[in-house]
Image (cartoon, rainbow, N blue to C red):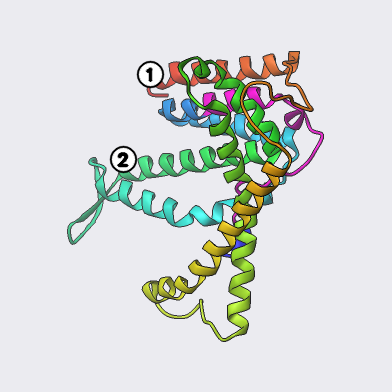
Amino acid sequence: MALKDITLGQFFPGSSLIHRLDPRAKLIGLIAYIVALFLANGWLTYLIAFLTLALVVAVSTVKLKALLRGMKPVLFLLVFTAVLNMFYTPGTPLAKFWIFTITYEGIVHAFFMVIRILMLISATFLLTYTTSPLALTDGLESLLGPLKKVRVPVHELSMIMSIALRFIPTLIEETDKIMSAQRARGADFDTGNLIQKAKALIPLLVPLFISAFRRADELATAMECRCYHGGEGRTRMKQLHYKPGDGLFIFAALAICVGIGVLGRFGW
C-alpha cells in the first residue's frame, strides 16, 4: 500500500449538486446514513443503503477510482473483521479445523459487516471529497451551536477537527518525502517480516514529529499575525443559508433512515 492511497481529508473541487449542498445538510445526511447502516438487518435494507450511496456517488461526479483507492489502507481491518465473524458466529457448521468452525451464519454476518464498513467509509470519504475544510468547519460549528449555551467550546472543537482533516494529506506527503530521502541513503522499508518492517519505520518518527511540530508552530504564528480569534464576533466571508435543495436532501436522508429502520425490525 502506497501512502498516496490514503485520501482521507482531501477535497476535490466541483460544481455537482452534492458539492453545492449546504455542509450542514451533508453532515446531517451522513449521520442519518450511518444510523441507517447500523439499523440495516437483511438483504433488502443493505440493498437500499447500497443503491442510496451509489446514487449519491453518481450525482457527486467523484470518480469511483478515488473511493476504491481510499479503501486500500483499511483492507487489513476488513479481512480481520471478516475472519472474526466467520469463526466466532454460532450457527450451522460448514467446515471445521482445529478449534475453529466456519458457519453459514458466520459467512453471512461477515459479508454484511464488511459491506457495512465499506459503505460507512465511502460515505465519510464522500463528505470530505465534496466539502472544503472551511465549509466543513462552519457547518459543524453551526450544528453544534446550541452547545455554546452550556459553555462547550464549539468553535475551537470545530477548528481542531478541520485542521486535523486538512493536515492529513500534508503529513502523508511529508512522510513520503522522508521515506524517499531515507531510501536514497540506503534505508530498506520493504523487506523482512512484519516486525522488521515496523522497526524500519521507527527512524521516520523523529523527522516526522519535528516536521509536524514545525508546521503547527508556523500555523499558530500565521494565525496570531492575522489577529485571528474565534468565538463571538467572528465574521465569515461566506454565510451559510439553507436552500430548498438542502431541505429535500435532509428529508430524503431521514426518510431512508426511518425506512431502513422499520424494515430492519422485520429482519429485511
Tally of numbered discs:
2
Residue range of the region highlighted in magenta in the rendering: 6-33
Is residue 173 magenta-colored?
no
Depth order, front residue of 22/38: 22
Q: Which residue is mark 2?
A: 105
Depth order, front residue of 197/121: 197
Q: Residue at x 61, y 39 (%)?
A: 162
Left or right, 134 with respect to 231, comes to right
Q: Residue at x 52, y 19 (%)?
A: 148
Q: Which residue is mark 1?
A: 265
Task: Please determine whether, in this image, residue 107 is positioned above or below residue 211.
Answer: above
Hey, what amino acid is under mark 2?
A: Glu
Left or right, 179 with respect to 247, comes to left
Secondary element type, mark 1: helix
Task: Please determine whether, in this image, residue 61 is positioned above or below residue 75.
Answer: above
Q: Residue at x 44, y 44 (%)?
A: 114
